[in-house]
Image (cartoon, helix red, strand yellow):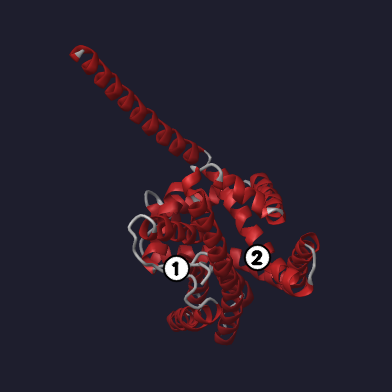
């Protein structure tokens, strides 16, 4: 009898050990899958962002005008195309010409500054550094025109499908989890969706304001290609913290050809615009509904940039918003039992 009991305990111990090994192997396999499919998953996330934008435009039409979802989404897509088309018609030619001029001016300005620093080739400045690796990866990725076009189509169709029937995809994802935690996962996804919507609306408006303010400030200072530099500043502002710093580099290089005093004025203009955005624009548009600590945002941008390249940099901050919501609800509130504010949570 004692031998049988010992044998049963040993069998249970071995079964438990094997189960733990299987669980660890499953997590490792999941991690490897995410790693290999990281670019695809980031493009899916881009599609989610597009779906959030479409739903954000469509939902007021559904509530206030009583339009059907299909009509509202069609009008939302049409509104986006009209706005982009109007910008292209009104400013496209001018911005294109100024961007072409920038591409001619920037290399000479950069080489002149590097020569003053005793660096013969710009590649010597970047080789072997984290920033250099990201820059080289960005250049290689940017040259693959066919890949970019394919990725863009993938994002557009993914966004349309998700926006047309978000509940199906949301419920399907929730059902992958054990039944006892499915309600909690569903609430987390809903909060993350609302937080992304708030952040996107605020960020897109901030990008527009930053682009216009930067262009006007540089135009008043007398910097060439001010509208192109403002366009770059507006687009780069999609990546908070790092984007504005990167966007200031072309403006400072152009200003360097006109003397030290112009560089100082240009730097002051970029700093002033960012202060207005941080202290006036974003608080008025988003308020405190979505708030990520600057250090956390910076870490997310750098970490995902190193791990996944340009796509990681581009979507690091909205991913940080989603992770922040998940950590606050699933860990801090549900696991630790602490009271904590959650971005996007219904009051």
Above/below status of 141 relative to 289? above
Instruction: Identify which residue, 5 or 123, lies in the foreground.
Output: 5
Can residue 142 be seen here? The reply is no
- Crowd tier of the residue under label 1, counting other residues whose Cα lies within 10 Å: few below 14, some 14–19, many 20 or above: some
Residue located at (21% from left, 17% from top) = 6
Q: CA distance from mark 1 to mark 2?
A: 27 Å
Residue located at (47% from left, 76% from top) = 288
Across and down, in percent, residue 70 comes to: 79, 59
Do the residues under discs 1 and 2 have CB atoms within 8 angstroms?
no
Quadrant of res 121? bottom left
Left of 162 or right of it: where is 277? left
Outermost residue to the front: 1
Across and down, in percent, residue 55 comes to: 68, 63
Tell us which disc is closer to us: 1 or 2: 1
Instruction: Identify which residue, 122 or 206, lies in the foreground.
Output: 206
Above/below status of 9 relative to 335? above
Which residue is label 1 attached to? Answer: 241
Left of 145 or right of it: where is 344? left
Q: Quarter holding the N terminus?
A: top left
Residue located at (45% from left, 53% from top) = 305
Instruction: Identify which residue, 187 or 8, lies in the foreground.
Output: 8
Which residue is label 2 attached to? Answer: 100
- Crowd tier of the residue under label 2, counting other residues whose Cα lies within 10 Å: few below 14, some 14–19, many 20 or above: few
Can residue 216 be seen here? The reply is yes
């Amino acid at each position: 009898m004692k031998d049988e009991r010992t044998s049963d305990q040993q069998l249970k111990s071995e079964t438990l050990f094997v189960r733990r090994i299987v669980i660890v192997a499953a997590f490792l396999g999941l991690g490897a899958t995410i790693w290999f499919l990281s670019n695809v998953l980031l493009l899916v996330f881009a599609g989610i962002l597009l779906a959030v934008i479409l739903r954000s435009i469509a939902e007021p039409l559904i509530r206030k005008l009583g339009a059907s979802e299909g009509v509202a989404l069609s009008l939302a897509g049409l509104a986006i195309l009209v706005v982009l088309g109007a910008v292209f018609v009104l400013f496209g030619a001018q911005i294109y010409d100024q961007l072409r001029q920038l591409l001619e001016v920037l290399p000479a300005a950069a080489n002149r500054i590097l020569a003053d620093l005793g660096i013969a080739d710009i590649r010597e400045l970047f080789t072997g550094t984290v920033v250099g690796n990201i820059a080289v990866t960005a250049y290689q990725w940017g040259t693959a025109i066919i890949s970019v076009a394919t990725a863009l189509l993938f994002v557009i169709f993914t966004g349309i499908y998700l926006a047309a029937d978000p509940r199906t995809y949301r419920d399907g994802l929730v059902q992958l989890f054990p039944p006892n935690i499915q309600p909690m996962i569903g609430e987390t996804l809903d909060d993350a969706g609302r937080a992304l919507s708030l952040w996107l609306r605020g960020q897109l408006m901030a990008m527009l304001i930053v682009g216009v303010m930067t262009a006007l400030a540089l135009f008043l200072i007398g910097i060439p290609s001010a509208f192109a530099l403002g366009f770059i500043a507006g687009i780069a502002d999609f990546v908070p913290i790092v984007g504005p710093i990167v966007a200031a580099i072309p403006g400072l290089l152009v200003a360097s050809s006109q003397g030290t005093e112009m560089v100082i004025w240009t730097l002051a203009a970029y700093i002033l615009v960012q202060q207005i955005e941080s202290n006036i624009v974003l608080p008025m548009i988003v308020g405190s509904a979505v708030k990520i600590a600057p250090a956390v945002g910076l870490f997310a941008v750098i970490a995902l940039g190193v791990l996944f390249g340009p796509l990681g940099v581009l979507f690091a901050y909205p991913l940080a918003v989603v992770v922040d919501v998940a950590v606050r609800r699933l860990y801090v509130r549900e696991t630790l039992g602490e009271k904590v504010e959650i971005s996007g949570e219904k009051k």
